[in-house]
Amino acid sequence: MSYFVFALKRVYDCGRPPLREGAFRTREEAWAASRRMIDEYLRRESASCPSAQALYERFRRHAAVPFICSDVSESHGGLDFNPLKYALMRCEEMCGEAQACA
């Protein structure tokens, strides 16, 4: 079984197909790739955000949001990873611990 990570841009890319970011042998590898995509975006943007909420809103509006699918139907569809929840958690961690957004 393979897992595929795609990146879907929000509003301004309507009509364009999602970009394929990679194929992975396990769900955990696909989750890790999705987390890396989110973390890289948040690190780049964190210096110019005044708060965790501002960073999260920027992510929601402008980032390519990863989603995972598999080549075999599963009971959970391989979609146990919630990129928005993960991004919110990381925004709070980054801005709280490192004061990167202050």
Image (cartoon, rainbow, N blue to C red):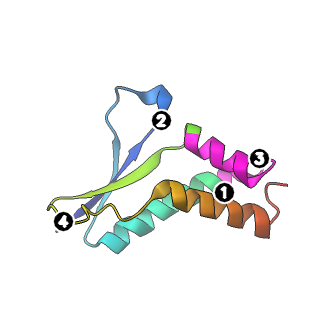
Dot 4: within a 10 Å radius of its alpha carbon, few (fewer than 14), some, or many (20 or more) residues? few
Disc number at residue 13? none
- Mark 2: amino acid: Arg
What distance separates the C-alpha of mark 4 from that of mark 1?
A: 33 Å
| Chain-order first, disc 2 or disc 3 | 2
Q: Secondary structure at mark 2?
A: loop
Q: Residue at x 72, y 45 (%)?
A: 54
Asked whether the beta carbons under mark 3 and mark 4 sit within 8 Å of each other, the answer is: no
In this rendering, the label closer to the viewer, 3 or 1: 3
- Mark 3: amino acid: Cys
In this rendering, the label closer to the viewer, 4 or 1: 4
Q: Which residue is mark 2?
A: 10
Q: Which residue is mark 3?
A: 49
Q: Position of residue 74 (x, y in %)?
A: 18, 65
Q: Residue at x 43, y 69 (%)?
A: 32
What distance separates the C-alpha of mark 2 from that of mark 1?
A: 19 Å
| Chain-order first, disc 3 or disc 1 | 1
Q: Main secondary structure of the magenta part?
A: helix
Decide: is 28 above or below 57.
below
Q: Position of residue 31 (x, y in %)?
A: 40, 67
What distance separates the C-alpha of mark 2 from that of mark 3?
A: 20 Å
Q: Front-most of 45 and 92?
A: 92
| Chain-order first, disc 2 or disc 4 | 2
| Chain-order first, disc 3 or disc 4 | 3
Residue most toward the front?
Answer: 75
Q: Which residue is mark 4?
A: 74
Q: Residue at x 32, y 60 (%)?
A: 79
Q: Which residues are magenta?
A: 43-60
Q: How many marks?
A: 4
Decide: is 29 above or below 69.
below
